[in-house]
Amino acid sequence: MNDQEQLKMLAILEQQKLHQQQVDRVLKVVLPVVAFLLAMICANFNMLSTLGTIVMMTVAFWMVGIRRKLVWHWATIVIVYCLIDNLYSYQGSFNLDAFGRQCGTTLVFLWIIGIGRPYIDRWLMKSDATPRK
């Protein structure tokens, strides 16, 4: 590889880094809002469950969507949190409907964010590469 090709490659990588930072800035606003709205829908019916679900979803979405941590690790953390929250919310008994609602919704959106992030990056790179009229 000669110097000109290396400079071209470095310019492309720098452009990709800038695009990823732009997506990160957008996701830093969008993901907490999504976590708040989902927590209002799927949290158990007490205040501590709602607050804990908002915090847990925000952290999980942030780690998977922005920090790009492994989705499997955060899916495990979400399942454990939902089990503990379910047991505390229903005084030691297990409510399957509430668990399915809370855990299912959180996991679906966690997977969507984790799998969709590379596609968002690629889409933004392609949209800037096409000439505008």
Image: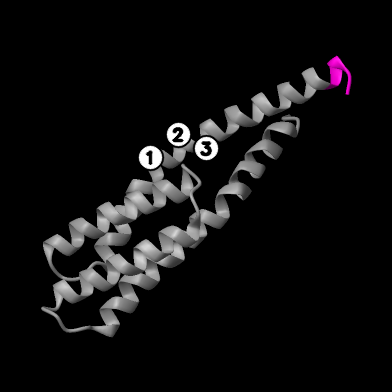
Q: Secondary structure at mark 3?
A: helix
Residue beneath disc 1:
29
Disc 2 marks a residue whose amino acid type is: Arg
Q: For the magenta stretch, what is the residue range?
A: 1-5
Which residue is identified by label 3? Answer: 23
Inter-mark Cα distance, 2 to 3: 5 Å
The quadrant of the rendering that contains the N terminus is: top right
Image height of 121 relative to 102, above or below: above
Q: In the rendering, which numbered label is found on residue 25?
A: 2
Earlier along the polypeptide chain: callout 3 or callout 1? 3
Prevailing secondary structure class for the magenta stretch in the rendered image: helix
Answer whether labels 1 and 2 touch (C-beta < 8 Å).
Answer: yes
Residue sitting at 26 percent across and 55 percent down? 54
Q: What is the distance, in whole Å, between disc 1 and disc 2 at their CAs?
A: 7 Å
- Whether label 2 touches label 3, CB < 8 Å: yes
Check disc 3 and give the amino acid type.
Val
Q: Return the x and y of residue 109 as percentages of the image width and height.
A: 44, 61
The percent coordinates of residue 7 (x first, y second) are 78, 18
Residue 75 is left or right of residue 38, and the answer is right
| Crowding at mark 3 (Cα within 10 Å: few <14, some 14-19, many 20+) | some
